[in-house]
Image: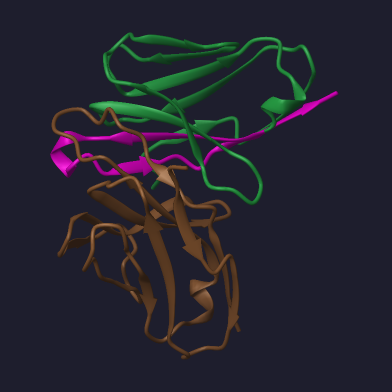
C-alpha cells in the first residue's frame, strides 16, 4: 500500500530534550515536506526537500532541523524543544513536477507532540 | 496575513442540504488543490485544478477554479454525514517551486 509513515503518533516530552520524528514513504517520491497544524493557523510548512541532500526552509523553520540522506526518509529533528512547538505535525510527499502542480501530496497520519 | 482565505470557517447543516465553501486570495496561483481531513488523520487530496474557469466533478462534489485563478469554490449537493470533515484548499505557484500554501480550512458537520 502506498503510504507515508510517521512515528511516533503521540509524544509528550520536556523542554530541551532532543527528539526526532521519523517519516518514511514507499512511493519513490522526490519531494517531501513537513507541516505543522495549529488551531486558527492552518497547515504551515516547516521544511521541504526536492530530492536527496536537497532541503530548504519553509515558512516556520525556526527550532527545527531536517535531513534527506535517502530518498524514502525525511526525519524532523527538534534539538531543544520548547512549549511553543506543541502541535500536530504532518509529513507529506509527492512526485516532482515541472509546470503547474498536477500531483497532490500524500500525507502521513500525523504526530501529536506536546512539550511541557 | 493568510494568503488563502476560506469561508465559512465552520458550517453545520442537515443531511440532504446543499452547501458551498469558498477559497479566496489576492494572489494568482498556477494550480489549486482541495483536501479533506478527518479527525486523527492527514489530509487526503480530492482534486487539482489548473486552468482558469475549470470545473471538476467528483460524485456530489463540484470544484471550480476562478477565471483569474485567484479563487475557488467547492459545492456539495445533498450532503451526507460521511461528508463531515475539515476541507482545505491549497494553492501553488510555479515561481515558488510549486510549494503549497494552505488555507485555514472549513469545518463541515453534516447532521443526520
Out of B109 and A93, give the one closest to the viewer.
A93
Q: Which residue is at 41% across, 86% downward?
A: A80
State the residue lying farthest toward the bottom: A16
Query: What type of secondary structure mainly makes up the magenta span?
Result: strand
Q: What color does chain A have in the rendering?
A: brown
Q: Which residue is at 37% across, 76% downward?
A: A77
Q: Which residue is at 23% across, 57% downward?
A: A49
Q: Is residue B91 magenta?
A: yes
In the rendered image, the vertical position of residue B69 relative to residue A21, given as above or below: above
State the residue lying farthest toward the right: B112
State the residue lying farthest toward the front: A1
Q: Left or right of B66: which side holds B30?
A: left
Picture quarter containing residue A96? top left
Q: Which residue is at 53% across, 57% downward?
A: A110
> In the rendering, at what x and y percent does residue A98 appear?
14, 33
Please report the bounds of the magenta region as a residue range. Answer: B85-112
> In the rendering, at what x and y percent does residue A47 appear?
29, 61
> In the rendering, at what x and y percent does residue A63 appear?
35, 77
Shown in green, the chain is B
Q: Left or right of A78: which side holds A108?
A: right
Amino acid at each position: 500500500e502506498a503510504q507515508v509513515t510517521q512515528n511516533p503518533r503521540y509524544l509528550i516530552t520536556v523542554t530541551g530534550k532532543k527528539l526526532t520524528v521519523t517519516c518514511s514513504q514507499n512511493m519513490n517520491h522526490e519531494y517531501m515536506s513537513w507541516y505543522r497544524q495549529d488551531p486558527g493557523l492552518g497547515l504551515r510548512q516547516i521544511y521541504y526537500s526536492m530530492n536527496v541532500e536537497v532541503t530548504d526552509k519553509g515558512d516556520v523553520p525556526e527550532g527545527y532541523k531536517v535531513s534527506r540522506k535517502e530518498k524514502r526518509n525525511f526525519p524532523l529533528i527538534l534539538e531543544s524543544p520548547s512549549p511553543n512547538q506543541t502541535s500536530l505535525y504532518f509529513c507529506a510527499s509527492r512526485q516532482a513536477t515541472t509546470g503547474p502542480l498536477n500531483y497532490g501530496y500524500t500525507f502521513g497520519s500525523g504526530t501529536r507532540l506536546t512539550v511541557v | 496575513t493568510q494568503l488563502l482565505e476560506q469561508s465559512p470557517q465552520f458550517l453545520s447543516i442537515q443531511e440532504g442540504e446543499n452547501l458551498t465553501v469558498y477559497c479566496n486570495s489576492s494572489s494568482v496561483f498556477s494550480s489549486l488543490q482541495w483536501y479533506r481531513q478527518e479527525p486523527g488523520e492527514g489530509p487526503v487530496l480530492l482534486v487539482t485544478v489548473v486552468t482558469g474557469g475549470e470545473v471538476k466533478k467528483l460524485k456530489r462534489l463540484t470544484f471550480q477554479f476562478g477565471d483569474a485563478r485567484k479563487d475557488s469554490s467547492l459545492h456539495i449537493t445533498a450532503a451526507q454525514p460521511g461528508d463531515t470533515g475539515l476541507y482545505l484548499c491549497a494553492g501553488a505557484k510555479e515561481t515558488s517551486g510549486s510549494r503549497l500554501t494552505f488555507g485555514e480550512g472549513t469545518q463541515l458537520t453534516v447532521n443526520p
